[in-house]
Image (tube, rainbow, N blue to C red):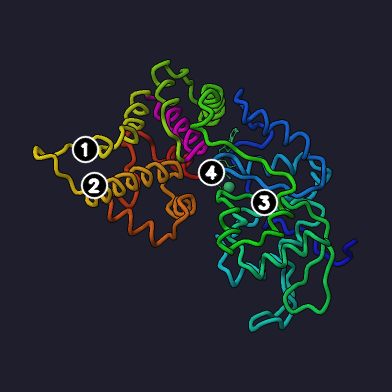
């Protein structure tokens, strides 16, 4: 039992998304039925869970749902976004420090692990943890103990650890970046969230749901989408997954125009031209040039879609694309994309501000 853990600080509780986790839409796809079964079975058991899925597939939503149905639902849900905190700060953020542990440590500070006592510690993008922190996390999972930086003694804490990743951790293990023993510890139960393009049968239910939610939120009457638009939605590849669909539906509710949606999907849409290269009359072709052009074209399309899916938040888009923020800025310039999304003129600033803050 832990006697010294500090009470959770309210400042660390996670801002809730628009949609509370109870309102998760599973749909009818088989993959999501498996997710539902696993969530129901595992929520009440205090075992570590690893949630995997592409960006925007609902990993955080599932983590919150697991928390809400855990025996410690009344305790804190503490999220740590591993890549967002610079390496040197992450250790003190996670495990805390004692007075004098390093220059500038004028007092003691509990870490987020302690704050999650009798609650859930959600480690987002756990694959980004560096080796020293992986070792400390392993100790926490093995015996519930950890050590503040500069402390003489270990502390004990009771937490349910839920991790998320959009990387193939097996590859990271192979490359020597992630500890295999830690992988086994965090992966006692594994929940795989399928990409939206692999469960297009769920799109109509999700669309209805988002129209209902945002129609009420923005106080707009909403028309159900036409069969043509629905078909287009089901054909789209959704690199930003449910977040992308949700943002698109928000705009549909605000703009009230199906045409705008069709245009937007078309703009994200047509197959790139490299799939149908025009050979010169003599039949010669530079494979090298063609490949380079294909890569650039594909990159441009994916970057644009991921920016859209993340409401042009370039930091989030860089994380979703698994590249550095600087690399993304460079690629945006290289692809001739604008730095910001061009906004439609017909929406009032207040509505757009509301839309932005809701993202
Ligand atoms: N099954 C679902 N039903 C309804 N809404 C969902 C569902 N899954 C995700 N969402 C919504 O999609 C958005 C993205 O979900 P979430 O933040 O959980 O994804 P994520 O996998 O953690 O993404 P990232 O990898 O980018 O952090 C949220 O606004 C959430 O409300
Ligand atoms: Mg997330």
Q: Is residue 25 visible?
A: no
Name the outermost residue toward the left. 281
- Image: 194 above or below 11: above
Left or right placement of residue 125 versus residue 134 in this view: left
Percent from the top left, x then y, of residue 182? Answer: 70, 59
Q: Nearer the viewer, residue 234 or 354?
A: 234
Number of residues whose C-alpha sits closer than 10 Å to that of mark 4, classed few (under 14), some (14–19) or many (20 or more): many
For discs 4 and 1, the disc positioned in front in the rendered view: 1
Instruction: Specify the segment rendered in magenta.
Output: 240-257
Q: Is residue 244 magenta?
A: yes
Kindly identify the residue that appears in the image at 74 percent across and 68 percent down. Answer: 110
Kindly identify the residue that appears in the image at 83 percent across and 62 percent down. Answer: 143
Identify residue for label 3.
163
Name the outermost residue toward the top. 227
Are the residues at dot 2 and dot 1 in contact (C-beta closer than 8 Å)?
yes
Sequence-wise, the earlier of marks 1 and 3 is: 3
C-alpha distance separating marks 4 and 3: 14 Å
C-alpha distance separating marks 4 and 1: 31 Å
Identify residue for label 1.
277
Are the residues at dot 4 and dot 1 in contact (C-beta closer than 8 Å)?
no
Identify residue for label 4.
54
Identify residue for label 2.
290
Percent from the top left, x then y, of residue 78? Answer: 70, 54
The secondary structure that dominates the magenta segment is: helix
């Amino acid at each position: 039992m832990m006697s010294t853990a500090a009470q959770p600080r309210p400042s660390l509780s996670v801002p809730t998304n628009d949609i509370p986790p109870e309102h998760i839409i599973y749909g009818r796809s088989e993959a999501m039925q498996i997710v539902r079964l696993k969530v129901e079975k595992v929520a009440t058991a205090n075992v570590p869970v690893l949630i995997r899925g592409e960006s925007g597939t609902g990993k955080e939503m599932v983590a919150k749902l697991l928390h809400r149905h855990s025996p410690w639902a009344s305790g804190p849900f503490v999220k740590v976004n591993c890549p967002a905190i610079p390496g040197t700060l992450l250790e003190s953020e996670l495990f805390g420090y004692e007075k004098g542990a390093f220059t500038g440590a004028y007092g003691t500070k509990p870490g987020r692990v302690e704050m999650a006592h009798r609650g859930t510690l959600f480690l987002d993008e756990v694959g980004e943890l560096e080796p020293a922190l992986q070792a400390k996390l392993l100790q926490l999972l093995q015996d519930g103990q950890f050590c503040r930086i500069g402390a003489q003694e270990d502390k004990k804490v009771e937490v349910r650890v839920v991790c998320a990743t959009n990387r193939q951790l097996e590859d990271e293990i192979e490359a020597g970046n992630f500890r295999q023993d830690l992988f086994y510890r965090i992966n006692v139960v594994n929940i795989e969230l399928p990409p939206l393009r692999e469960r297009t049968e769920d799109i109509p239910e999700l669309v209805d749901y988002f129209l209902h939610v945002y129609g009420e939120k923005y106080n707009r009457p909403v028309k159900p989408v036409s069969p043509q638009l629905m078909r287009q939605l089901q054909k789209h590849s959704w690199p930003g997954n449910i977040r992308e669909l949700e943002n698109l539906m928000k705009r549909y509710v605000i703009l009230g125009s199906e045409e705008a949606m069709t245009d937007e999907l078309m703009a994200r849409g047509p197959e790139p031209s490299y799939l149908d290269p025009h050979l010169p009359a003599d039949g010669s072709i530079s494979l090298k040039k063609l490949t380079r052009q294909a890569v650039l074209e594909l990159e441009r399309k994916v970057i644009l879609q991921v920016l859209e899916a993340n409401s042009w938040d370039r930091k989030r888009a860089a994380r979703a694309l698994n590249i550095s923020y600087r690399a993304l800025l460079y690629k945006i310039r290289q692809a001739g994309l604008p730095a910001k999304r061009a906004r439609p003129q017909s929406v009032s600033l207040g509505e757009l501000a509301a839309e932005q803050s809701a993202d």
